[in-house]
Amino acid sequence: MPPNRLFRTLGFRLTFLYAAWFSVSALILFGFIYWVMTDFTARQLDASIAAQVTSLRQDASPLGHASLADLIRQRSEALGSSEFTYLLQDPSGIRIAGTLPQVAPSNGWLYLPFSLITGIDGDSEHDFRALGTLLDDGSFLLVARDTFQLDEAFDLMERIFGWGFAVTLVLAFVGGAVVSAGFRHRLENINRTCGEIINGNLSRRIPTSGTDDDFDVLSTNLNRMLEQIETLMENLRQVSNDIAHDLRTPLSRLRQRLEGVRSTARALTDYEAANDLAIDEVDALLATFNALLRIAQIESGSRRSEFTTVDLAAVARAIVETYAPVAEDRGDLIKESFVPTLPVPVPGDRELLIQLLANLVENALCHTPSGTTITVLLRAADDTNGPRLIVSDNGPGIPANERSKVLRRFHRLDPSRALPGYGLGLSLVAAVADLHQATVTLEDNMPGLRVTIGF
């Protein structure tokens, strides 16, 4: 990959940001540890010097500065006390004891450079930390200790910090590279799948890792979208084929009638009769196209914005009351079986739900013999299921291998092809149910057909 392209990749940016943030965090952490440790060491050094001053003053206080001078000499010569260096000056500024150079008397802390004490410059030598005290008789006591321990602590912390920061920086870049590599791999899977889909393979899906992370959620949603697109494309292909196949017959029949009238008609009444038949045929074709447009509108989901709370019980009762006289004229019976006595509210479009139930009842009336009993059953929601609307009959039913097909546009069973219609009734039912996020289940009613709309 060219460098300019590499620098623009999200993986490189993630690696850089990960390393930068990790490094800044490490700098803050090491800086805090450095400050705490060096401050602790400096306090320990000052505490040891202050303790030495206090000890000298307490031990020599009864005898005056002569006794203090003896104590200083003893401690300077004693084994293990060479780490401290002393100075005792009389009130006139003359050195009485100790090896430190004479300084102006003052109470408090001060630093003494190594060159001032030894007269020799040396980069590897250490300065001295000192505490001066004016005594009651006017003499001046100065106790010093070299900063070797403090300097060693500084050096150790700096080495630890240097190596630690270097290791941290390397780990940050390695960690960032690993994270970005996984990120890039997941993106490449998505891009590769999209490329195959663009090339026409609509069955391809984005692989998931099974970790249920953000990428898996995104991949799952994209796969659902792709399944919907594939379904829509398949429906479009099927509709195109079905329109070309099923509508060709009535158009051919219409053309043959018009040609026949032109060649055989002898009177105006013949033309009028042919015209009436042609108008009926055209009206049926227009009704078919209107049904297709209505199904397309429903499947687009635009009607979902008009959803209100609809009482399924009121819809079911209205359909039963409307179609009861029609069924009676055919010698059929429509009866209701409503388990709930209270309203059964669902969010939806009342007009479309009425159309759904009307299509189911009309389908039962059209495709069953005289004397059929049609039952409209409504069940309220329970602990495991939502409301269910069921239309059943005791007619011939639908074979099991055909039940999924009859929900497609223009699909008709062989016995139904002689009846009016183009096989769009159940397709509209399926579209309305899908808009309401409901399921359509076709089952054997033993005998007959049982259609369940599960909300």
Image: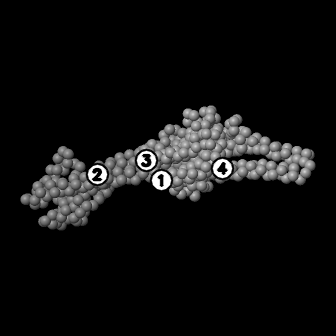
Q: Indicate the position of residue 151 as horizontal and vertical percent values.
A: 33, 50
Q: CA distance from mark 3 to mark 4?
A: 66 Å
The residue beneath circle 4 is 295
20 over 136 or under it: above or below = above
Q: Quadrant of residue 247?
A: top right
Q: Indicate the position of residue 432 as horizontal and vertical percent values.
A: 60, 49
Q: CA distance from mark 3 to mark 2?
A: 22 Å
* Pair 3/2: label in front: 3
Q: Amino acid at mark 3?
A: Phe
Other-residue count near label 3 (Cα within 10 Å), few / some / many at <14 / 14–19 / ≥20: some
Dot 3 or dot 2: first in sequence order is: 2
Q: Which mark is residue 343?
A: 1
Q: Indicate the position of residue 223 as horizontal and vertical percent values.
A: 58, 43
The residue beneath circle 2 is 41
The residue beneath circle 3 is 165
* Pair 1/4: label in front: 1
Question: On the rendered image, what quadrant is the N terminus found in?
Answer: top right
103 over 442 or under it: above or below = below
Q: Amino acid at mark 1?
A: Pro
Residue drawn at x 38%, y 53% is 31
Q: Indicate the position of residue 203 as horizontal and vertical percent values.
A: 64, 38
